[in-house]
Each structure stands twice: as structure tokens, then as C-alpha cells.
Image (spheres, coloured by chain):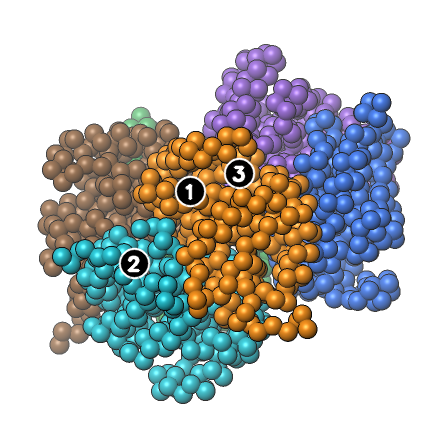
Chain colours: A brown, B green, C purple, D blue, E cyan, F orange
Amino acid sequence: MTDVHNIDDQPIYVINPNSTEAITVGIDRSLEQFRGPDTPQIICATLREGPRAIESQCDIDAVVPLLCHRIADLGARARAFVIACFSDPGLYSARGVTSKPVFGIAECGVRTALTLGHRFGVIAIRPASTVRHLQYFRSLGVSDYLAGDRPIDLGIAELADQERTFIRMVEVGKHLRDIDGADVLILGCAGMAPFETSLADALKIPVVEPNKAAVAIALDQIKSCI
Amino acid sequence: MTDVHNIDDQPIYVINPNSTEAITVGIDRSLEQFRGPDTPQIICATLREGPRAIESQCDIDAVVPLLCHRIADLGARARAFVIACFSDPGLYSARGVTSKPVFGIAECGVRTALTLGHRFGVIAIRPASTVRHLQYFRSLGVSDYLAGDRPIDLGIAELADQERTFIRMVEVGKHLRDIDGADVLILGCAGMAPFETSLADALKIPVVEPNKAAVAIALDQIKSCI
Amino acid sequence: MTDVHNIDDQPIYVINPNSTEAITVGIDRSLEQFRGPDTPQIICATLREGPRAIESQCDIDAVVPLLCHRIADLGARARAFVIACFSDPGLYSARGVTSKPVFGIAECGVRTALTLGHRFGVIAIRPASTVRHLQYFRSLGVSDYLAGDRPIDLGIAELADQERTFIRMVEVGKHLRDIDGADVLILGCAGMAPFETSLADALKIPVVEPNKAAVAIALDQIKSCI
Amino acid sequence: MTDVHNIDDQPIYVINPNSTEAITVGIDRSLEQFRGPDTPQIICATLREGPRAIESQCDIDAVVPLLCHRIADLGARARAFVIACFSDPGLYSARGVTSKPVFGIAECGVRTALTLGHRFGVIAIRPASTVRHLQYFRSLGVSDYLAGDRPIDLGIAELADQERTFIRMVEVGKHLRDIDGADVLILGCAGMAPFETSLADALKIPVVEPNKAAVAIALDQIKSCI
Amino acid sequence: MTDVHNIDDQPIYVINPNSTEAITVGIDRSLEQFRGPDTPQIICATLREGPRAIESQCDIDAVVPLLCHRIADLGARARAFVIACFSDPGLYSARGVTSKPVFGIAECGVRTALTLGHRFGVIAIRPASTVRHLQYFRSLGVSDYLAGDRPIDLGIAELADQERTFIRMVEVGKHLRDIDGADVLILGCAGMAPFETSLADALKIPVVEPNKAAVAIALDQIKSCI
Amino acid sequence: MTDVHNIDDQPIYVINPNSTEAITVGIDRSLEQFRGPDTPQIICATLREGPRAIESQCDIDAVVPLLCHRIADLGARARAFVIACFSDPGLYSARGVTSKPVFGIAECGVRTALTLGHRFGVIAIRPASTVRHLQYFRSLGVSDYLAGDRPIDLGIAELADQERTFIRMVEVGKHLRDIDGADVLILGCAGMAPFETSLADALKIPVVEPNKAAVAIALDQIKSCI
């Protein structure tokens, strides 16, 4: 009877495609505002079989079959899926294994940012990811609106130091705002979720946390698409 | 003491800039899914001093000062504003009279649609509005993704006949889907909100109701921007 | 009998939508070259009910109904209208209240500049207006050809000092030419008309005075469109 | 002493780069409205050494050295040049042989059309020229605004029949307006000048005659650039 | 000593990522013209562990890790790689597992087609793939030059009938050429290689066989990039 | 009997449109890798009647009729033509005088570069040529992918000093790579062919020699187009 579900009981699954549980926890906390007695359940899940981090196109491509397998498994009892990695791995593939709506946080983050400003800036982790981002932004038709995409460029050990990470994010955010001309910023990594509010406070321009942006759009669409 | 408010008590104002109360009621009902004990209050308001309908660029431009006046008045006790007219009248102007986030339903509807499909179609009321839409879509950088924008082209008397209106919407929606190649549709008028679910059922592709799209994005941003 | 006019008697109205008469006088003088015994009359008018200056989107939107009212009033005895403010306020709205051609100086200035060079630079008054310009240039499809848009950033008192204003315009113009790569410049404010010739002399690249650009295009079109 | 000229005596040269005198006469007549006692002289000249018609890229390229030679010869005693062929042959090359402003009628026609409408249509002579036009429109950045470019496709003998030519122009213009969605038309050949007014009368949308569009812009620029 | 190779002995590997050997044979034959005593060896290989056909985004994403594994294995003894599937699966990922140049046949086919014509048409197998193609063409920046992408829409059994397949390809090609306005065609599937010459003969416009286009570019680059 | 040729005997003609024989020799050497007993003959020819160098739009336009004359002459006994000047002079015109494929090295160089990287840089000789390049890149639809186009800016005497020229090329290439963000470079002059390999060695990113890029594409197309 696994396929028989009351639609009202079906959760939105937010899947962190890397195996680092701490990132899933950070995402989960950032979504607290969307929870309530009358709202659909939001479950954040870790793809345990995924890599510890997703840092290259190889990592991205390697995780897609694993992620699609998970989404196919969960499909019958889900309302919608959010892929919680700023590379939107497997977004189009996932749509082939489930009829439920699937959202990528990068796309939702960028589309949301464009409702808030005229030129968006992205705070990335690594220099190498900015080339991938650019190519993706081109395919979304938003590259003309990109003010800049700049990495904080910290190693794994340094990222563990939250204070240091935040200081770098503020530095990079100021550069994007003051030199590149961004009037809205996007956190270019799912794991940056905990810094959203303090960064917006520090920089005084809107900051988009892409996991939240995707869940907000999902919460709208689950009603109209099913 | 009018400026002292507990942020948690501040509502999102969804302002229908025409004076037709029935449209405000339709919008209000479509937003029911976002309401709950823990979520911000959503208040739909009619701009009584606005015109009965907004059908031309003149109507749009005429309503902007009235709408901005209202938004300036409400600013201190609002969390965010949604301008509930598919022409997004006064969107940039409103941002000049309040520091709270202001969203236009056309922009939010289109950005949301692009997270759901590759080519969007718009169901408009009047032929004349499609030229205005095109120009606006160009300024948003999304015109390359427009599959088509087609009017149901019914007069006021005919629009009062809901069954007839729906039949035309289905006809136009099928044309957008089958001939123009749209894989997601947007309701191109705030007053079409009541038809969202039945249209999606009839056409089997995602349908974006732009009032809801805007409120969903607003619900995300009110946390991070204030 | 107000609607019966000999077409040959009808003037082109150039309407300055702010109430500062001195600006209208400056525009009027710059148009002298287009006047002659056989050419249509060109009348520069001040919108007395407009604001003293148009510096924000709010100012722009507020002036539109007033401006459209004036244009509707004058429509029967005009050949064409030019809206003499670099934000082109109410351009599309005005076209709805008159059947006569209506031109905006920003659009005409940019289109003319592109016949003279490959990358255009804009000399603006205020930093805030450059964001508005960018959005407008996007909707016109010319933003890829924008080399830069830089403000002279002087206050009202400073603008009264013509020598100082000119020195800043030359500085900004050189930056646009030498650093940003502009090969043609546009005066990004109707009030800059008096500086056209001396600026072109100082910078040795074409300078487009947008009031003149619009009147030149209007003089062509009044023959073919009426 | 050939280099010593009073600037006020210098004419604008409108050069028809083909050797067909009748076309030059038609252009000359269409420019009558710009002439007056106080306005710069406008001289229409035929490039006698040019081909009888310019119908292919080969014709275009072949005429460029001849045209540039003529422009270099005339440079010292001209205020500005207009190249009166809708392919704008040698526009950039001509700018290398004279310091005076040089305008192409295709570019000026398209830029002017975009101040009058949102989507322009072009009435061409031959099917083959529409591919050349498209490529040129792309380099001008205006191809997204092209509603359609359709040939009347008449042979030389048929073109001599003015009535027949006009009937075809109206047919093609209606197709561009009603099927392709053009709201402004451009006469895509210098030789179509005589049909401007009657075509606008027949179609009730603005028609741009590109020779006039170029001369209007030239009349503005000769003051500011020299 | 497996890493020590004489560069002159290293082949270009053309990898068919599906397991259908017959397709690899067809590709191999089409590349005959590039072979000679002095030219680098070209080896066509079948990815035996791949799916029988690549028809969906899921198929594409599933094959990427397998393909990258193979490319990583071969990297030390290869000069360059060509991924012989019109979806360019794993192109960016493969570049992460080898320092040798990697080419995708879709990208190379489109870039080559644009050197031959102004508007390219694609002959696809299935309707569903045209949406994927469009998205990819957007990311390559070539979608404005796409005249049309039309499927022959035959099932597997029908594709086995070469005569029938060819008749459909000619039909679709004529539609692309005559109705859509394509002046160059691309075979939108690696398996269509055997039809290149007869299709070009039948349609009299250039036809790009993408496997060959990629190998030609690879043959150039292997000299300059290693 | 001059029109009767065995297709297998027909060479690809690579025509250097300037009269400087030393450049033709450099091009010829760079094409050595494409020669073999089974491959089509590649003949590099100097347009003796051309100018000594092609440095301006005038030079370009002046050479076109001469070049087309030569191509028309050779057409019957050629398989394909390559125009070996980075301005692609007369590319479209040449296609009008021969039915054989004609390739321009600038277009082929850029299209090839885009298969190797995401943002291309161009090393030019003179500052003035970068404006011409930009305009051409716009018409090819590739200007969004241009990282930078920078001249080495050496005079003729300095260019004769190969060591000095190479040092400047490395300097400019580093700027394009490190400051402008290019991940692939194009040699923006046919005469730079001899520096390809050493520049790629020095900069460690792919370098496209456009003569070779064009011949590689020609070698593919001669089979399928004739």
C-alpha cells in the first residue's frame, strides 16, 4: 500500500546531495520559518551515499544517478523536491524520474534575487565554481544581470571557523556591492544558510538564502501543480 | 506612537490597485494556503481611489501616485507589499516611498514560471496588453523565454460569465501549449486567480497564479530583508 | 472649432515636465538650429504643475498624469510631442492620450548615439539615476552597447555654478571615453543642453544633446505619420 | 585653397551608390521638407561609376572603394555624408576617409523606427537581401525587435510599373503588420522613397523612409560634431 | 611504465557512450576521410557499460560517471577525446578527469554549422530531445541562430529501416530549409552519420555531421594544446 | 577544358589578402600538420595585388573586389577557400562568386575557441582593430563570450623583431588570462601563426591559431558540401 498516500500528509523533501550531515542541519534550521501546523511538512534529508562535498563538475555528475535514485524512491510519498546544492545537480534528470515538481536552489535563488534588485552578486566558496555558475546562469538567461561572482576561497579547515568565514563573506559581499555594483546578494552554497541574517544586517542590501528561496517557491507550486 | 510596531504583528499588504472589490476577494481566497497561526498576516486591500479596471498604459500611470500614497501611508506598519496587478504599476516608484520590500505579481509570476518550465505562455485579457507585457518582459530579460502571450479577448459583460471565461482560458491555454510550445502558463491578470486549479487540471502543465507567486516570495524575503 | 486646424500651423511641442523655467529656456535655445521660415514651429513649454526637479522614480511617476493631461489638452493643435526629460516619463502613456507622435529624449538620444559610435557613454547628474537608466536601456535593447553611465554628482547649489559643472562634465566625459571606452557621449539630463558644443570641443568625440536628437527625429516623422 | 571653406556653405551630401539617376531623383524629392533658407544645403549625388543596381553582397563590396574615393574627394567641402543604399555599403570604411560624420540609411531607418514602435517590419525588394539584412541587424543589436523582413519580389520590368509595385508593397506591408505583428514599417530600399506617404495612408501605421531618417539625424549632428 | 607514451603514438578516442555497436561502426566509417599515414590514429570505442540508447536526461546523467571513468582510464595514452552523442553528456565533467582536450559533438557541430550558414536547423530523433537541445543551445549562446529543431519521430523498429529513415530525414530537412529558413543542417544524433552525403545531395544545402565536425576540430587542437 | 577537374585533385586555397609574402610563408608552415599523401592539397597564395598590410576598414573594403576576382578565377579548380586575414574581408561577397565553401579565419578561430573555453581573449596588433573586431563578434553572436581584445601595439619595425613581439604577446596574453578572465586565446592576426606553440607553452591555456582552425573546418566540410 506504499503508493496510497493522503496528499495532505506528503512532505516537501529538501535533499542535501552531499553526505555532510552538518550542512543538512544548517539548511533545516534556516527553513524553520516555513513550518506551522497548517503548512506542508518539510523534511531535510542527507544523501548519505553522496560525496562529502560537491566541488567539481565530476562531483556533480557523479551524484546525479544517486540523487535520482533517491528521488524516484521517495516520489510516491512526496509533494515536491528541492535539490539543496548550488550547482542544481540533476535538476532536469530528476524531473524525468518523478512527476512531482523539482526545484534547484541555484535557479530559485537567482530568480528570487532578480525580484529584489537589478544586478545580483554571488558569494561562492571556490574560484573554480564561478566558471560553472557562469555557464549555468547563461543557460538560465540571467548572465546579463550578474554583477559579480566572487569566492571567499577558504579551505575546509578555515571554513570550520565560522567567525573567519563570516568576515570573509562580509569582505566579499562589500566588494560585490561597492565595486561590482550588486544591489542584491545570493549565498552561493547551501552550507552558507546560517549566515543569511547577519550578512544582510552587515551589508544593508537584500541577501537571498537559496534553500529558503526554493522552499518558498515550492510551497506555492505544490498547490497548483498536483 | 504609530511608528512603533512589533515586527511580528506586521502584515504583508497585497494591494489591488483597481477599485473592483470582487477582484480583491478572489485574490484573497487564492492566498488562503499561506495563512496559519504562525505565519505573517496577509491583508488584501482594494485601492478604492483607483480606476475600476486597469486596461491601458494611461490607467497604469494614473494609478501610480495613488498607489504610492497608500504604500507610504501603510509603510510603517507593513512587512512587505505586493502590487496585485499584472502590469506591476509603480513597482520601482513604490520602492522609493517605503524601505519595506515591494513585489510585483507580473515579475514574480514570470520568475516563478521559469523555475517550472523552459518556455512560458501568458493568458491575457485584452490584445492591447500583450505589447505592454512584451516590453516589460524585455526589461526583465525574459522575452527570449516567452512562448506566447495571447488574450482571451472578452468584454466586461462576457467576463462576468465565469463558465464562458474558463472555456476561453482553456482554448487559449491549449494554443499556447500545443502551437506556441509553452510548457508552463501564467495567468496574466490578477482577477484570474479563481481559475488556477481548474486550468492546471484541464491542461496538465503547471499554471502560475501570480498573486500567489508574489506572496510566496514575499514570505521568504520578509525574514531576511528586515 | 478648436479641433479644426490647418496642419501647417501646428507646432511641435517640447514639454519640460519639471517646473523649472530656466531649463526650458536652455532647451529652447539649443533647438534654434531647427527653426526657419519653412519649418514647423517648435514650442518649448514648461509643465508648471510639475515638480521643481525630477530626481527619483517617484518624481517620474508623479508627473505622468499631469503630463498626459497637458498632452491630451494640446493634442488637437499639435503635430508631435517631445517629452524633454531624460527619464522619458509617461512616454507610452502619452501615446494613449494622443494620436500624434510622441518622442522621449532619452530613447531618441540613445538611438541617435548608436548611429555615431559603437559604445555610448552617459553623463548623469545623480548616482541614483544610473540604475533607472540601466533598466530603461535594457528595455530598449541597447544595454550591451553601454560603455558607462557616470554621474557628475553635484548638488543643486553646485549646479548653479556653470563653470564648475562644465569642469565636472569634462572629467566624467574623459573617464567615459578613456577608461570605459565610449566613442560617443550622451548628455543624460535635459538641463545639460547648453554644454553640448563646448563638451564636444573639449572631448573630440561626438556628443548627443537628446532634446535636439528628439526634435530632429520628430521633424522627419511629422511628415510621414500624419 | 580647396581646403578653406566657410562651414556654413558646406552641404550634406546624400550619395546614391548606384548609377541609376532616377533613384537619386526620387530620393531628392523626398528630402524637400528639410530644405529652407536657413538650413544646410542638401545635395543628392549619383555615383556614376557604381553599378546600375546593388543586389548582392558582391555589388555592395565592389562599390565600396568607388564610394570611398568619392567621399574622400568631397570631404573637405562637405558637412556630412549620407550613404543612400539600404545595405549601408562602406559605412565604416567611409568613416576612415573623412572626419565628417557619415550616416547609413539602413541604420538610421531602423534606429528611427524603434522610436516609433516595438517591432519593426522591413519591405525588401528581393528575397536574397533579407539574409544580408538579418546579419546587419544582428550587428546593430536590433534583430530581437525585427517582426519580419519580406520582399515584394518583383523583377526590374515590374518595378517600372509603379502602380503594381505599390500594390505589392501594400500586400507585403499588411502581412508584416497583421501576421508578423510589426507596428512600424521601414522601406527597405532607397528607391522606395516615393511610396512613403501613400503607404502610411494605406496601412495606418508609421512608415519610415530611411533616406529622410538619415538626413534628419545628420541635420542634428552637423551642429554638434564639427 | 604505463604513463610513458610517445605523443605521436597517441590516438584520438571517439567514444560512443551508448552500448550499441552498430552506431560506433557508422561513426567509424564516417571518419575515414581523416585517416592517413601521417595523421593521428582515430579510435572509435563503444561504452559497453552504457545504455542501449540515450533518450532522456536520465540516460544522459546516468552515463556520465561511466564515461568519465573510461576517459580517466584512457587519459594517459590519448591525445584528445570526442564524446560521440548529440547531448554532449559529461563534457565538462570529463574535462575534470583528464588534461587532454575533450570535445562534444553537439557543440562542435553547431559551431561548425555557424561557419557555413546564418540559421541552422537540427534533425532530431525524438520530440522530447528538442527541449534539451534548446536549453543547451542557450547555454552555448547560439539559440538566436536556431531556425528549427524537428524530430523525425520514428520508433526503434522504424529506425532499423534505413530507407524509411532517410525519407523522413529528407522531409524534415525540407521543412527546416523551406519553412523554418535554415541554410545549414545538423544531424542531431551520432547515429545519423551514414546519411550525411545523401542528405546534402538531396537538399542542396550544407549538412554537418557532428562526429566529423568534432574530429576535425580535435585534429587541429591536438597540436597546439598539448 | 579548364572547368573539367577531378575533384580529388582540387586543392583548398588559403589566400593571404595582403601582398606580404613572408606572412603567407608563415601561414603555410603552420598548416604542415594537415598535409599527407591522402589529404587534399592545401595551397597558400598571396594576393599580390593586395595592400602590404590590412590595418583599417578602408584596407579591408579595398581588398574585397581584388580578392573576389581571384576567388572567382580559381573557383572551378578549388575545393574550398580560406580567407587568411583576421578581418574576414569579403567573406560573404566571396560566397557570391563561387559555389565552393569559403571560410574566414576570424569566424573559424572564434567558433573553435568556444569549443575549448568559456571566455575567449584576442591578441590584436593595433588598438584600432579591436573596435572592428567587437562589431564583427556582435554580428557572429559571440560578443558576450569575449573576455577581452587587447593589442600588442607594436609598429612595423618592432614587429620585425620576433623576440620582442613574442614578449609582448606573452604580456598581453597574461593580462587576458589573469585580469580579463580568458580561458582560451585567439591569435588575432594571420601573421602571428609562428607563435602559436610557444605562446601556448608559456601561458598554459589553449591558443587558437585561426588559419589552422579554418583549414580544419574546411577539411571536414569539403567532403560533405560538394
Please provide percent x and percent y for residue C22: 67, 19
Question: Mark 2 falls on what kind of element?
Answer: helix
Task: Work out whether C200 lies above or below D57.
Answer: above
Q: Local crowd at mark 1 within 10 Å, few (<14), some, or many (≥20)?
A: some
Q: Can residue E79 be seen from the camera position used here?
A: yes
Amino acid type, label 2: Asp
Q: Taking E37 as reference, is B161 left or right?
A: right
Residue to which mark 3 is pinned:
F130
Residue at the spot x=46%, y=39% of the render? Answer: F123
Residue at the spot x=66%, y=41% of the render? Answer: F58
Task: Work out whether D223 lies above or below C216.
Answer: above
Q: Earlier in the sequence, mark 1 or mark 3?
A: 3
Please provide percent x and percent y for residue D31: 83, 43
Q: Nearer the viewer, mark 1 or mark 2?
A: 2
Q: Can residue B92 be seen from the camera position used here?
A: no
Amino acid type, label 3: Thr
